[in-house]
Image (cartoon, rainbow, N blue to C red):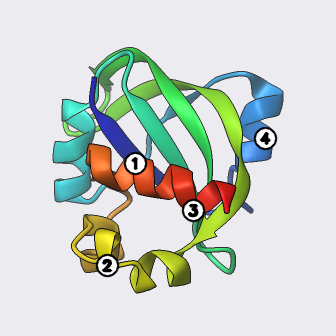
Amino acid sequence: MARWLFKEEPSHYSFARLQEDGSTVWDGVTNNLALQNMRKVRRGDRVFYYHTGKEKAVVGEMKVTADPRVSPEDPKAVAIEVAPVRKLTRPVTLAEIKKDPALADWELVRFSRLSIVPVSEVQWQRIEELSRS
């Protein structure tokens, strides 16, 4: 099982809306590196949900419910089914993440415009700790 972080503008599709809907198809990614990451995602993977825009924070956890599939209209396009797991006890902001030495080399910080990034076990556990503090 791998771990990931997916970014979304909350005014477009928020974690609260995902919780209301119960599941969604994650698509619309166009960046080549993000698409490469997306193709590596597998059913059962855990995913942090990150709100972009003014919020800039990890706000929840999702699970991947189906392997990636290619769009019949566009062979470069990928879609993934996800479902909510839980809202974090409190959001972990990008400002907090940037200040934390354990998270300094995370792709979330180094490649700030990338919408799908891997999360190591150490990074995942640190975000969990920060969300409970």
Circle 2: element type:
helix
The image position of residue 6, as x and y in percent, is: 45, 50
**Quadrant location of residue 36?**
top left
Contact? badges 4 and 3 (CB < 8 Å): no
Seen in the picture, residue 122 relative to 115 is either above or below; the reply is above
Q: Which of marks 1 and 4 is in front?
A: 1
Seen in the picture, residue 87 relative to 21 is either above or below; the reply is below
Location of the N terminus by quadrant is top left
Callout 1, which amino acid?
Trp
* Residue tagged 1: 124
**Quadrant location of residue 40?**
top left
Contact? badges 1 and 2 (CB < 8 Å): no
Location of the C terminus by quadrant is bottom right
How would you rate the neighbour count of disc 1 (Cα within 10 Å): few for under 14, some for 14-19, many for 20 or more?
A: some
Q: Distance between the residues labelled 1 and 4?
A: 23 Å
- Residue 130's disc is 3
Q: Which mark is first along the chain, 2 or 3?
A: 2
* Residue tagged 2: 101
Callout 4, which amino acid?
Arg
Q: Nearer the viewer, mark 2 or mark 4?
A: 2
Report the residue at 30% width, 51% height from top: 122
- Residue 77's disc is none
Contact? badges 3 and 1 (CB < 8 Å): no
Contact? badges 1 and 4 (CB < 8 Å): no
Q: Does residue 123 appear in this view?
A: yes
How would you rate the neighbour count of disc 2 (Cα within 10 Å): few for under 14, some for 14-19, many for 20 or more?
A: few
Callout 2, which amino acid?
Pro
The image position of residue 128, as x and y in percent, is: 53, 50
How would you rate the neighbour count of disc 3 (Cα within 10 Å): few for under 14, some for 14-19, many for 20 or more?
A: some
Relative horizontal placement of residue 17, taking residue 58 as reference (left or right)? right
Viewer-side residue, 99 vs 38: 99
